[in-house]
Amino acid sequence: YLKAMPHNCRAWSKYADLEKSVGETERCRAIYELAVAQSALDMPEMLWKHFIDFEIDEGEGDHARALYERLLGKTGHVKVWISYAQFEGTEVGKGIATAREIFKRAHDQMKDAGMKEERVLLLDAWRVFEKTKGDAQNLAKV
């Protein structure tokens, strides 16, 4: 099926889930790598999210981080930036300071690109992040 329809993200995801369910972590990872390497995908954002979530579930923060960076190389979408920063603020991530660096990096890039609406979304997410995980001083900076 995948040979005939390599653009089908659901099929790739189900195949990877099957391998994961039988304990084949490396095969699952390899399937995701093949999937995201396809030139045309019908729902690439779903596939990338599943791949990143798989790495986080496996406790592979470095792999998830590398995937976020690869994805940002393909798209600078605000949702990717927010998800990346939130990931860094978890126990699998590097911590709150790194999350702040990601938020700042995203803000600077969006500011340089004149992306006003996206910056509003980013700043709102950053503010919520600081309210839940940060302190009053950093919240005031946002």
Image (spheres, grey):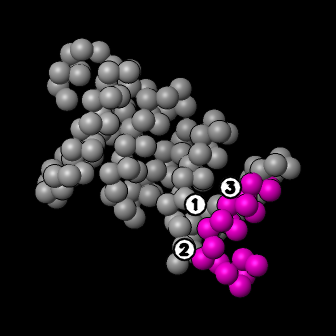
| Furthest residue toward top | 136
Residue 53 location in percent, x, y?
59, 45
Q: Amino acid at mark 3?
A: Arg
Picture residue at 21% right of the left edge, 47% below the top:
119
Instruction: Please give the residue where the numbered disc 2 appears in the rendered image.
Output: 41
Residue 121 location in percent, x, y?
27, 44
Q: Which tag, 2 or 1, sits closer to the chain's start?
A: 2
The local secondary structure at tag 1 comes to: helix
Picture residue at 42% right of the left edge, 35% below the top:
86
Left or right: residue 38 versus residue 137 is right
Picture residue at 32% right of the left edge, 36% below the top:
125
In reply to whether residue 11 is colored magenta, the answer given is: yes
Q: Amino acid at mark 2?
A: Leu
Crowdedness of circle 3 by 10 Å Cα count: few (<14), some, many (20+)? some
Q: Which tag, 2 or 3, sits closer to the chain's start?
A: 3
Determine if residue 9 is in view: yes
Residue 69 location in percent, x, y?
42, 52
* Residue 29 circle label: 3
Q: Amino acid at mark 1?
A: Leu
Q: CA distance from mark 2 to mark 1?
A: 9 Å
Q: Nearer the viewer, residue 72 or 136?
A: 136
Q: Are marks 2 and 3 in contact (CB under 8 Å)?
A: no
Q: What is the quadrant of residue 71 in the picture? A: bottom left
State the count of labels.
3
Instruction: Please give the residue where the numbered disc 1 appears in the rendered image.
Output: 47
In reply to whether residue 30 is colored magenta, the answer given is: no
Left or right: residue 33 versus residue 98 is right
Which portion, as a residue range, is magenta? 1-19
Q: Nearer the viewer, residue 127 or 88?
A: 127
Q: CA distance from mark 3 to mark 1?
A: 12 Å
Placement of the N terminus among the 4 image quadrants: bottom right
